[in-house]
Amino acid sequence: MKRRGRGIACMWYPIGFTVAANPSAATVKVNEDGTATVLTGTVETGQGALTVLSQIAAEELGIAMDDIHIVSGDTDVAPMDTGAIASRTTYVTGNAIRLAAEKAKLILFDVAAPVLGVKPSQLEARDRKIQVKNYPQRCLGIGEVAHRAQVVMGEPAIGSASWNPPTVAMDPETGQGKPFSTYVYATQVAEVDVDDETGEVEVLRIVAAHDCGTAINPMLVEGQIEGGISMGIGFALQEEMLFDKDGRHVNPNLTNYIMPTSLDMPEIEVDIVPSFDPTGPFGAKGVGEPTAVPTAAAILNAVHDAVGVRITSLPATAEKVLAAIKAKREGATKKLTAV
């Protein structure tokens, strides 16, 4: 008989590394055609990092994302980046790019201010223009200003910056300190069916609520959460490295190392919790690795809710679940016999 259960799991997760320096650097150059070139040491590994970083640069410069050209991961020309790891790229590298873009923008303001007859502090960058605040009709094209900065003023609109999250070293005696600059939070709820005759677990639905600060790109955030849940399902129910008695790995390839496919994915509902981190670029934090953290716990709690057994070693294969169910039944039988 299939029995249904629901389980919940909550998590918090730090962004970046602990205590040690965790910097990123960036260079932003505004070109005479109104586009901008961004140099960053980070790399795109399929998570959409370069899209988000382009959005951050474009927002700061007041141009379209299509106007941004990113040169990434080339150590010959790009400045240092600690890496696309520890769920830090949006937060740390994004801050470095925003600061570099701001420096380039301030050069444009200094060049445009005398032409527009105002102070640099009275200007803003918006819609591919440098314009007077509250008077958008008084404006110059960004490309025009960038050309003037280079050809007339002799100061090309180039900004370079680095950013390292502020931390406080851990006290070796008390363990107190602030090893991370910011944290993300999430709750996931899983609904499962468990066959009490075979031990097979089917994940039917997962609802995931994640606080990642301001979502720079909500569609990418949703995709990250769904991808993390897929990994969490594999962690919870399928993925297992097996060894023989001599310690040899017996399932070293994808023929018999079982991973979730699209057919194993349940219905997923994603709720991006609105929040704002004042230390992040435009309020953003991160969302990468944390998306997989609560999934397995939620699924295993749902299994317990369905059939009343706790699985404490992963993955919770059908064999393990069935063995736990049988042990529970035998224990109940022994108690009845004793009575």
Image: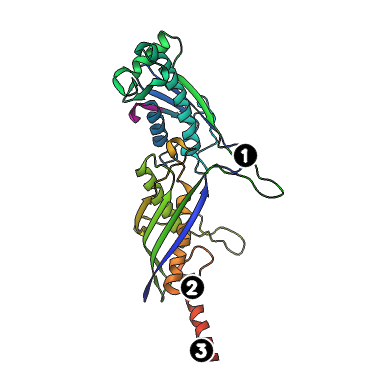
Task: Tell me if residue 256 can be seen.
Answer: no
Residue at x 42%, y 51% (from the top left corner): 210
Spatial distance from mark 2 to mark 3, Cα to Cα? Answer: 19 Å
Task: Give 253 or 52, whichever is nearer the viewer.
Answer: 52
Residue at x 38%, y 55% (from the top left corner): 261
Query: Around disc 1, counting alpha carbons within 10 Å, would you say few (fewer than 14), some (14 to 19), or many (20 or more)?
Result: some
Which label was assigned to residue 309? 2
Which residue is outermost to the right? 173
Q: Position of residue 76 (x, y in %)?
A: 52, 25
Q: Position of residue 266 (x, y in %)?
A: 35, 59
Under circle 1, the secondary element is: loop
* Residue carrying label 3: 336
Residue 138 in which image quadrant: top left
Instruction: Relative to 56, say whether 131 is above or below.
Output: above
Task: Tell me if residue 294 can be seen.
Answer: yes
Looking at marks 2 and 3 on the same chain, the residue that comes earlier in the sequence is marked by: 2
* Residue carrying label 1: 20
Query: Around disc 2, counting alpha carbons within 10 Å, would you say few (fewer than 14), some (14 to 19), or many (20 or more)?
Result: many
Which label was assigned to residue 270? none
Q: Say what amino acid the circle numbered 1 marks.
A: Ala
Q: Say what amino acid the circle numbered 3 marks.
A: Leu
Query: Around disc 3, counting alpha carbons within 10 Å, would you say few (fewer than 14), some (14 to 19), or many (20 or more)?
Result: few
* Residue 68 is covered by the magenta coloring: yes
